[in-house]
């Protein structure tokens, strides 16, 4: 699957960023019971954090780009932790947090930036449950933050 993901990324004109180090007292990935839980990932583009608030200084398209950047970081974290994306059996759930004004109500459309990418990369295994909520602020002023739960196969390492 790793080759397939790399090929699909190239077709989309995308590449995985370097997996970000934690910014506080937590680990980016915890595996338990066949599920990998990924801590909230922030959106980086060309090494720069995408900041701002939807409904204020970030438009819907900018929010979708930020969500896509979060999804790329999730895949980068998975690849770093698993070593081989072939272990990914299913993207189970995404939790999408959108830094937005009180009157902004298109959080699900913002979240589609991440959801659509997961399906594009993983096919049917990328279809997932999801929540998309508006929040008044996010760490470091990020526009979007996304956490994930991913089902994985057992390691093939002995």
Image: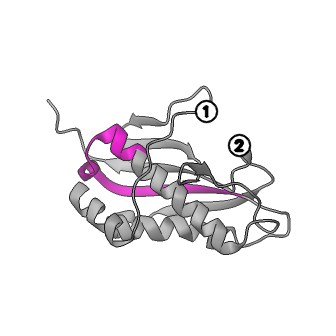
Q: Nearer the viewer, residue 158 or 48?
A: 48
Q: Earlier in the sequence, mark 1 or mark 2?
A: 1
Q: Is residue 34 visible?
A: no
Colour convention of the picture: one colour
Q: Is residue 42 magenta?
A: no
Check residue 46 in the rendering and tell me which mark sits there, or answer none.
none
Left or right, 66 with reference to 89: right
Left or right, 99 with reference to 9: right
Q: Residue at x 54, y 68 (%)?
A: 113
Q: Residue at x 62, y 29 (%)?
A: 24
Q: Residue at x 68, y 67 (%)?
A: 107
Position of residue 3 measured from the top left corner of the image (x, y, whole percent): 22, 58
Q: Is residue 83 magenta?
A: yes
Check residue 23 in the rendering and tell me which mark sits there, or answer none.
1
- The range drawn in magenta is 77-98
Residue furthest to the top = 25
Position of residue 36 measured from the top left corner of the image (x, y, whole percent): 40, 42
Q: Residue at x 35, y 57 (%)?
A: 90
Mark 2 Cα within 10 Å, few/some/many (few <14, many 20+)? few
Q: Nearer the viewer, residue 71 or 65?
A: 65
- Is there CB contact under 8 Å for labels 1 and 2? yes
Instruction: Report the number of discs.
Output: 2
Quadrant placement of the C terminus: top left
Position of residue 100 measured from the top left corner of the image (x, y, whole percent): 77, 61
Which residue is denoted by mark 2 in the rendering? 139
């Amino acid at each position: 699957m790793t080759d397939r993901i790399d090929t699909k990324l190239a077709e989309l004109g995308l590449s995985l960023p370097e997996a970000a180090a934690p910014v506080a007292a937590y680990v980016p990935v915890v595996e338990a019971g066949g599920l990998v839980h990924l801590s909230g990932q922030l959106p980086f583009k060309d090494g720069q954090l995408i900041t701002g608030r939807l409904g204020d200084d970030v438009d819907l398209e900018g929010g979708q780009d930020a969500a896509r950047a979060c999804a790329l970081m999730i895949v980068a974290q998975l690849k770093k932790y698993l070593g081989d994306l072939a272990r990914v059996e299913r993207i189970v759930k995404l939790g999408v947090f959108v830094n937005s004004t009180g009157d902004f109500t298109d959080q699900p459309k913002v979240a589609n930036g991440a959801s659509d990418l997961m399906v594009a990369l993983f096919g049917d295994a990328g279809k997932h449950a999801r929540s998309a909520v508006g929040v008044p602020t996010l760490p470091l002023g990020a526009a979007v933050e996304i956490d994930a739960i991913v089902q994985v196969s057992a390691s093939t390492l002995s």
